[in-house]
Image (spheres, rainbow, N blue to C red):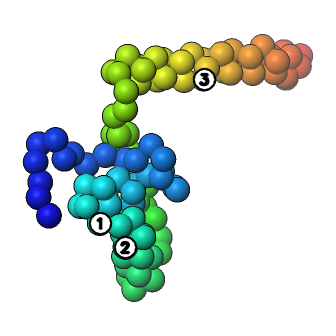
Amino acid sequence: MTFSKENKLYRSRNGKILGVCKGIAQWLGWPVAAVRLILIVTSLVTAVIPTILIYLLASIILSPEPHGEAWEDENFYRNCRYAWRDLRDNMEQQYSHFSHRSKE
């Protein structure tokens, strides 16, 4: 197992669940099935809930694996941000009559 500056730990963009196990497997140079098996055995031996919480925490902390040009990721996240804003605005507009009814 050789580590270099180029071999950074990322979440995989094409993993099964959030890409954490696949990202760890790529970082270590192991098969992804081995990392998943270790995760399952660890969760059964210790406790399921803490393992799930650590997995979710890792998915938040680890940045997604880079791909393509940097502007592609920037556009992707900007489009997501606008999509959430548009969704919020549409829901506020659609359900605004509920707040007016409750004030009457």
Numbered badge on residue 30: 1
Q: Residues within 10 Å of mark 1 (few under 14, many from 20)?
A: few
> Up-down: is 33 above or below 91?
below
Numbered badge on residue 10: none
Quarter of the image with the N terminus in it: bottom left
Of 6 and 50, the residue lying toward us: 6
Q: Earlier in the sequence, mark 3 or mark 2?
A: 2
Residue drawn where x is 25% and y is 55% of the image: 27
Residue drawn where x is 81% and y is 21% of the image: 95
The reply to whether dot 1 and dot 2 touch (C-beta < 8 Å) is yes
Q: Is 33 positioned to the left or the right of 24 in the image?
A: right
> Up-down: is 14 above or below 47?
above
- According to the picture, the residue beneath numbered tag 3 turns out to be 84
> Up-down: is 24 above or below 10?
below
Quadrant of residue 26 within the rendered picture? bottom left
Numbered badge on residue 34: 2
Of 55 and 14, the residue lying toward us: 14
Of 29 and 20, the residue lying toward us: 29
Nearer the observer, disc 3 or disc 2?
2
Nearer the observer, disc 3 or disc 1?
1
Please state the horizontal and vertical placement of residue 39, each as a whole percent of the image: 39, 72
Q: Residues within 10 Å of mark 2 (few under 14, many from 20)?
A: few
